Image (spheres, grey):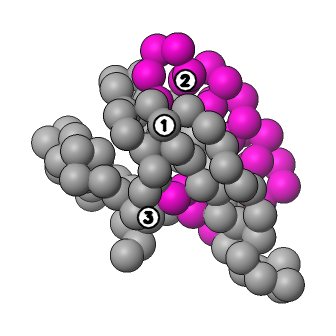
């Protein structure tokens, strides 16, 4: 798993913060991903968007990270949204019912 970029999408403080992820999100990468995303929340605007278009695999640990980070984001008044879902990740979210928990952006 690689965090490609973490940046606000515009000059305004109300512009969303966008994080591009790539590679596998598995047992070997979840701890680092959790730390990076929780750190990003400290600097995020009120909308944090995770771009998963370059994610090749997401295991149960990755889903756990998304759920945990979303909980922390909500506590801080930040909305965590997902975009660029590869078909396998979209199917995983659908099967688990998490497609109804996370805002999905086209």
Badge 3 or badge 1: first in the primary sequence: 1
Magenta-highlighted residues: 25-51
For the point 71% across and 29% down, which residue is it?
Answer: 35
Question: Split into 4 quadrants, where in the image is the C terminus?
Answer: bottom left
For the point 43% across and 57% down, which residue is it?
Answer: 53
Is 104 left or right of 36, judged from the image as shown?
left
Residue 57, quarter of picture: top left
Q: Secondary structure at mark 1?
A: strand
Q: Is residue 35 magenta?
A: yes
Q: CA distance from mark 2 to mark 3?
A: 19 Å
Residue at the disc numbered 1: 23
Badge 2 or badge 1: first in the primary sequence: 1
Across and down, in percent, residue 23 comes to 48, 37
Is 75 left or right of 27, judged from the image as shown?
right
Residue 4 visible, this angle: yes
Q: Nearer the viewer, mark 3 or mark 1?
A: 1
Mark 2: give few (<14), some (14-19) or many (20+) Cα within 10 Å: many
Residue at the disc numbered 3: 83
Question: Split into 4 quadrants, where in the image is the N terminus?
Answer: top right
Badge 2 or badge 3: first in the primary sequence: 2
Mark number for residue 60? Answer: none
């Amino acid at each position: 798993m690689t965090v490609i970029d973490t940046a606000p999408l515009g000059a305004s403080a109300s512009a969303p913060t966008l994080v591009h992820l790539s590679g596998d999100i598995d047992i070997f990468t979840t701890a680092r991903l959790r730390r990076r995303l929780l750190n990003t929340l400290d600097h995020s605007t009120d909308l944090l968007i995770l771009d998963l278009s370059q994610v090749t695999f997401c295991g149960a640990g990755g889903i756990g990270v998304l759920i945990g980070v979303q909980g922390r984001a909500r506590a801080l008044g930040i909305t965590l949204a997902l975009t660029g879902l590869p078909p396998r990740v979209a199917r995983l979210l659908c099967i688990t019912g998490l497609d109804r928990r996370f805002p999905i952006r086209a």
